[in-house]
Image (cartoon, rainbow, N blue to C red):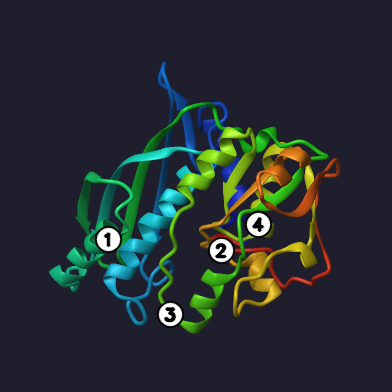
Amino acid sequence: MSLRGLGELGLLERIRPYLEAGAGADDAAVIHDGHRYLVASVDVYVEGVHFDFEWMSPEDAGWRSLALALGDLAAKGAEPEWALVSLALPSTWSASTVTGLYAGMKELGMVPIVGGDMSATDGPAVVSITVAGHAPHRPLARAEAKAGWVVGVTGPLGAAAVALRERKPFRLVPRIDAGARLNGLGLACGDISDGLVREMEKFEAMANVGCVVEAAAVPVADGASLEEALTGGEEAELVCAGPEDIVRGAGLIVVGRMTIEPEVIVIGSELETTGYDHFA
């Protein structure tokens, strides 16, 4: 079977036997170092897929790439401590394009870049960012979500989808402080990197529970359609699951409920897709 049509979750199931127990259950790895919980994540960005210099500057691409990487730490309530940046670059790139990427990351200013690596490629360019930080307590994994819990989001969704549609740069800011607070309340959180519905499909796959999403309850960013709010990715906002009193008390906007039946259902909207998947 080729990767096309297998899907990211399907591919993950194929490689899971080669991973440590529990690895791959979330976008970030959580490791207890004897004192605190180390949270680490790596993301890969490909020119022409994740960033496009026809309508964004190298600075915009650098900001965006690091911000999206840090979203995985925000989802686990970790305070960012360092980042490593590795690049595979075509020789046709200018030095100013490379320095522009780093300038954008520096402008975001949320974590020091302490190293990395460089290599040549015939193209396209590839940017790989590893980020790490510590959380004061063990974050809940997606696999620990329970039927009966409600699902809430931190804010309006779809702004990144609008920027993509209009071919305008979008400088998202990771919700680091919100992630720390929500994880401290014992909620299971994720960043909405591939779209709200797709994130709930990840909860389904890891916890074997489903979710009913009420489309009318989903907050929609200015200029976005309801479908963009439901399926658009690259969001700074977080989605969290937990007991209803805690989720509502945390000020989250409740958009759905986890169910025993392992299926994600959206009530009130017909979707053409459920979100972004590299291998769909």
Q: Can residue 25 be seen at all in this image of the molecule? A: no
> Is there CB contact under 8 Å for labels 2 and 4?
yes
- Distance from disc 2 to disc 1, alpha carbons, whole Å, reads 23 Å
Q: Which residue is mark 4?
A: 198
Rate crowding at label 4 as few (under 14), some (14 to 19) or many (20 or more) other CA atoms within 10 Å: many
Type of the residue with mark 1: Glu
Mark nearest the camera among 4 and 3 is 3
Question: Hey, what amino acid is under mark 2?
Answer: Gly
Q: Secondary structure at mark 2?
A: loop
Spatial CA distance of label 4 from label 3 is 24 Å
Q: Position of residue 43 (x, y in %)?
A: 41, 51
Which residue is label 1 attached to? 107
Residue 38 drawn above or below residue 189: above
Side of 131 where 89 appears, left or right = left
The amino acid at mark 4 is: Arg
Work out whether mark 2 precedes mark 4 in sequence or the reverse, and give the earlier one: 4
Q: Earlier in the sequence, mark 4 or mark 3?
A: 3
Crowdedness of circle 1 by 10 Å Cα count: few (<14), some, many (20+)? few
The numbered dot on residue 168 is 3
Identify which residue is drawn at 80% across, 50% down: 263
Numbered tag placed on residue 173 in the rendering: none
